[in-house]
């Protein structure tokens, strides 16, 4: 389990608080933000893990959850 709320707190620009109150920036907004995890494997390849809202995001990037890719393709 990745601490998404801690990540979002560190990556906040301040613009988000002007648009949304801190109460509305709860776990529901965490689900709205796509996060891509890249795990190195012993073989030199990388496993891609996708987290969060992936609806339209999947149409933009050529990655699939649990896909294994080479360094060159990254």
Image (cartoon, helix red, strand yellow):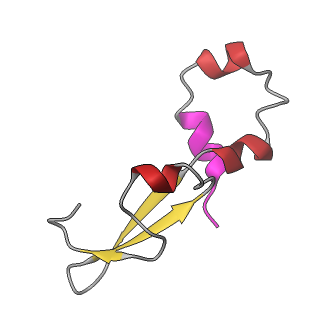
What residue do we see at 69% from left, 13% from top? 18
Please indicate whether residue 17 sits to the left or right of residue 44 in the image.
Answer: right
In this rendering, the answer to whether 49 lies above or below 66 is above
Asked whether residue 15 is drawn in magenta, I would say no
Please indicate whether residue 24 sits to the left or right of residue 15 in the image.
Answer: right
* 34 or 40: nearer the viewer: 34
In this rendering, the answer to whether 39 lies above or below 56 is below
Asked whether residue 4 is drawn in magenta, I would say yes
Exactly how many numbered labels are in the figure?
0
Outermost residue toward the bottom? 43
Q: Which secondary structure dominates the residues rendered in magenta?
A: helix
What residue do we see at 51% from left, 63% from top? 50
| Span highlighted in magenta in the image | 1-10
What residue do we see at 53% from left, 22% from top? 13
Q: Position of residue 74 (x, y in %)?
A: 23, 60
In this rendering, the answer to whether 23 lies above or below 33 is above
Location of the N terminus by quadrant is bottom right
């Amino acid at each position: 389990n990745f601490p998404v709320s801690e990540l979002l707190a560190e990556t906040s620009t301040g613009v988000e608080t002007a648009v949304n109150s801190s109460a509305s920036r709860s776990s529901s907004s965490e689900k709205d933000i796509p996060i891509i995890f890249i795990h190195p494997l012993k073989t030199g390849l990388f496993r891609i893990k996708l987290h969060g809202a992936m609806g339209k995001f999947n149409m933009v990037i050529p990655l699939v959850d649990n896909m294994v890719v080479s360094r060159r393709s990254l």
